[in-house]
Image (cartoon, rainbow, N blue to C red):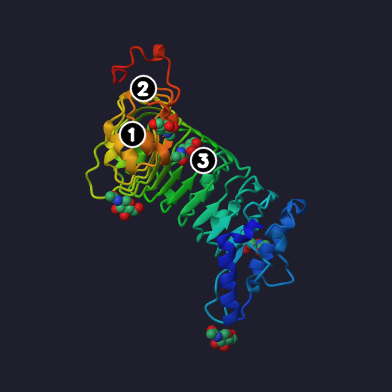
Amino acid sequence: MTRLLNPIFFSFLYISFIYTLSVNATTLQSDIQVLEVIKTSIDPVSISTDSFLSSWDFNLDPCEMTGTSFLGILCTIPLDTNTTSRIMEIYLEGDELEEFLTPSIGNLTELVSVNLGRNKFRGLPETITNLKKLTSLQLCENYFSGSLINGIGVLRKLEVLDSLTQLDLSNNELTGEIPQLNGLWQLSSFDLSNNQIYGNLPQFPLKIRTLSLGHNLLSGHITPVNKLRHLRTLDLSDNRFSGGIDKRIFMLPDISHVNVSANRFTTLEVVEFSDKGSQLHMLDVHGNRLCGHLPVNLITYPNLTEINLGHNLFSGEIPAEFWRRLAFLWRSLNLEYNYLEGSVPKEVNRTSEGVRGSFVHNCLTCPKGLQLCHGQRPASDCVGRNRGGDLS
Ligand SMILES: *[C@@H]1O[C@H](CO)[C@@H](O)[C@H](O)[C@H]1NC(C)=O
Ligand SMILES: *[C@@H]1O[C@H](CO)[C@@H](O)[C@H](O)[C@H]1NC(C)=O
Ligand SMILES: *[C@@H]1O[C@H](CO)[C@@H](O)[C@H](O)[C@H]1NC(C)=O
Ligand SMILES: *[C@@H]1O[C@H](CO)[C@@H](O)[C@H](O)[C@H]1NC(C)=O
Ligand SMILES: *[C@@H]1O[C@H](CO)[C@@H](O)[C@H](O)[C@H]1NC(C)=O
């Protein structure tokens, strides 16, 4: 029962505990009715015995319960003895629940967080728009399908929930283009990865910190991302984006992880970092069509430790500064499957022990016994490419 270790469960225990000690109020009657409807509307065959839902026992009061009944529910703490508790969070992740989410969920108007990830739900009832206090909605790995905006599109519905800060729709079967998310102006984490979303990027809400759009069919330039001043984590991997990876991305003050691998980018622009602090830790641009010399300015990013430039068309020599960084700062450097030339210094053998990475399949001359380098391109592949940068 690894799921018992989840933090929501513990906070649930904790809050119920405080609250049973201090007051003796019970759950608002109509909230209990909604929970009953939620349970009865789900195919009982799909409710496994170790799921949170199977612990809901309506002979007991949901918010009064501690321990093993009513798992996956968090209640508000009543202000005085006369007020009742309301349901504040519902956490039913990974319960394999089937098909149908009751429209009654819209009556739980104090809900702040709903996690229905990793189930088999197919749609959202219209009443979800009544949940005006919702800040977090996790619907990853379900069977949501259809266009994001047309008809009963899931984003069209959610647009009115302007308190939402976290929205996870990853691993569904959603399609269509991403609309302007004007209504969701508070959004800080947005995950649409692993769907079939296509089209260009819209302007995103400016508070976004985490943007995950990997494994879709998105295309065009990624310039809208350059404006997201609060961005920390960007994952645009495995799409059809093209054009340049702009220097402005790396100048965003909080940017830490950038994964734009497996696209069709042709240029990578990295300017010398002169400002006081940079949070950039990870850069993964592997599997694009980047050409020219390796971006030597990467060495000016003080916190950068994990770099993947593999599977591109880079040529020319590996900058000497890269080897020095590799000796004491960089933990991982992947340059495999490019057209890099020149000699790999012998000292790399000594420093390479703690280093992850690869230099294979280039046009390099490697010291004997250096596994990271073993297996270069045949000379015929390298002819005409070894004047560094002549591809750009
Ligand atoms: C939800 O609210 C509607 C409208 O007030 C009401 O008709 C319905 O009975 C409620 N459902 C539940 C399960 O409480
Ligand atoms: C609780 O309700 C009773 C009766 O309605 C009232 O007399 C009392 O003042 C209320 N107490 C609080 C703390 O509001
Ligand atoms: C970047 O994304 C790709 C594809 O999703 C993934 O395979 C890779 O591990 C990611 N890179 C890093 C450093 O996490
Ligand atoms: C590196 O990141 C840390 C926080 O992760 C930050 O405090 C520090 O200023 C950064 N270092 C530099 C030199 O930018
Ligand atoms: C480093 O070089 C020595 C010989 O100088 C060799 O025995 C050893 O296998 C090499 N180590 C690695 C990690 O390539």
> Which quadrant does ligand 1 occupy?
bottom right
As shown in the figure, which amino acid type bears the numbered disc 2? Answer: Thr
Label 1 sits on a secondary structure element that is: helix
Mark-to-mark CA distance, 3 and 2:
40 Å
Q: Which quadrant holds residue 110?
A: bottom right
Residue 270 position within the rendered picture, expressed as x and y whole percent measured from the top left: 29, 35
Q: Could you tell whether 71 is left or right of 357 in the image?
A: right
Q: Could you tell whether 378 is left or right of 2 in the image?
A: left
2 vs 1, front mark: 1
Crowding near the residue tagged with mark 3, few <14, some 14–19, many ≥20 C-alpha atoms within 10 Å: many
Q: Which numbered dot is residue 365?
A: 2
Mark 3 CB in 8 Å range of ligand 3? yes
Crowding near the residue tagged with mark 1, few <14, some 14–19, many ≥20 C-alpha atoms within 10 Å: few
Q: Which quadrant holds residue 267?
A: top left
Q: Which numbered dot is residue 347?
A: 1
Which residue is pictured at 59% across the width and 63% down the height?
9
Image quadrant holding the C terminus, namely top left
**As drawn, which residue projects farthest toward the left?**
274
Q: Given contact means CB atoms under 8 Å apart, are the residues at marks 3 and 2 in contact?
A: no
Q: Nearer the viewer, residue 99 or 345?
A: 345
Q: Earlier in the sequence, mark 3 or mark 1?
A: 3
Label 3 sits on a secondary structure element that is: loop
Mark-to-mark CA distance, 2 and 1:
14 Å
Which residue is pictured at 51% across the width and 58% down the height?
134
As shown in the figure, which amino acid type bears the numbered disc 3? Answer: Ser
Q: Is residue 98 above or below residue 70?
A: above
Crowding near the residue tagged with mark 2, few <14, some 14–19, many ≥20 C-alpha atoms within 10 Å: some
Mark-to-mark CA distance, 3 and 1:
41 Å
Q: Could you tell whether 234 is left or right of 63 in the image?
A: left
As shown in the figure, which amino acid type bears the numbered disc 1? Answer: Glu
Q: Which numbered dot is residue 193?
A: 3
Q: Earlier in the sequence, mark 3 or mark 2?
A: 3
